[in-house]
Amino acid sequence: MRDIMGMMGKVKEMQSKMEKMQEEIAALEIEGKSGGGLVTVILTGNGEMRGIKIDPSLFKEDDVEILEDLIVAAHKDAKDKGEAQAQEKMAALTAGIPLPPGMKFPF
């Protein structure tokens, strides 16, 4: 019975740490770039776009389609980086807990 109580205490502690970690991840600002830095997108740790910077040299009528593709690529770059940072933080939190390969926190 003592083991169950100890386990419940650890679960509550883990839950508290998880909530704090999620807040930290949400507060992250990640910068993604494409086109050699011509387009920069800034996302939160949750993937919300906070800003975009576009080099003025791209403002030509003929380059609109290229610009659209670069924005999408910069957004993906920032989102991938944010997911990687979130996984690193969660890995530190869940160290010592055996999880199946590929399982992500939070569920």
Image (cartoon, rainbow, N blue to C red):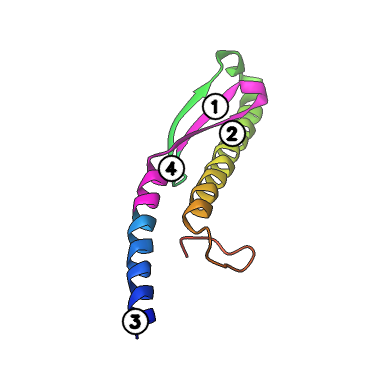
Question: Residue 46: where, in percent of width, then height?
Answer: 44, 47
Three-letter amino acid code of the residue under disc 2: Ala
Q: CA distance from mark 2 to mark 1?
A: 6 Å
Callout 2 crowding tier (Cα within 10 Å): few <14, some 14–19, many ≥20:
many
Question: Residue 22: where, in percent of width, then height?
Answer: 39, 51
Q: Which comes before the other along the chain, label 4 or label 1?
A: 1
Q: CA distance from mark 3 to mark 4?
A: 44 Å
When the figure is inspected, residue 85 is found, relative to residue 40, above or below; the finding is: below
Q: Pointer 2: what residue?
A: 74
Q: Quadrant of the N terminus?
A: bottom left
Q: Pointer 3: what residue?
A: 2
Mark 1: secondary structure? strand
Q: Pointer 1: what residue?
A: 40
- Quarter of the image for residue 76 reads top right
Residues at discs 2 and 1 in contact (Cβ within 8 Å): yes
Of badges 1 and 3, the one in the foreground is: 3
Q: CA distance from mark 4 to mark 1?
A: 14 Å
Q: Pointer 4: what residue?
A: 48
Any magenta on residue 30? yes
Question: Residue 100: where, in percent of width, then height?
Answer: 61, 69
Three-letter amino acid code of the residue under disc 4: Glu
Q: Which residues are magenta?
A: 20-43
Mark 2: secondary structure? helix
Q: Is residue 6 left or right of residue 94?
A: left
Mark 4: secondary structure? loop
Callout 4 crowding tier (Cα within 10 Å): few <14, some 14–19, many ≥20:
few
Residues at discs 3 and 4 in contact (Cβ within 8 Å): no
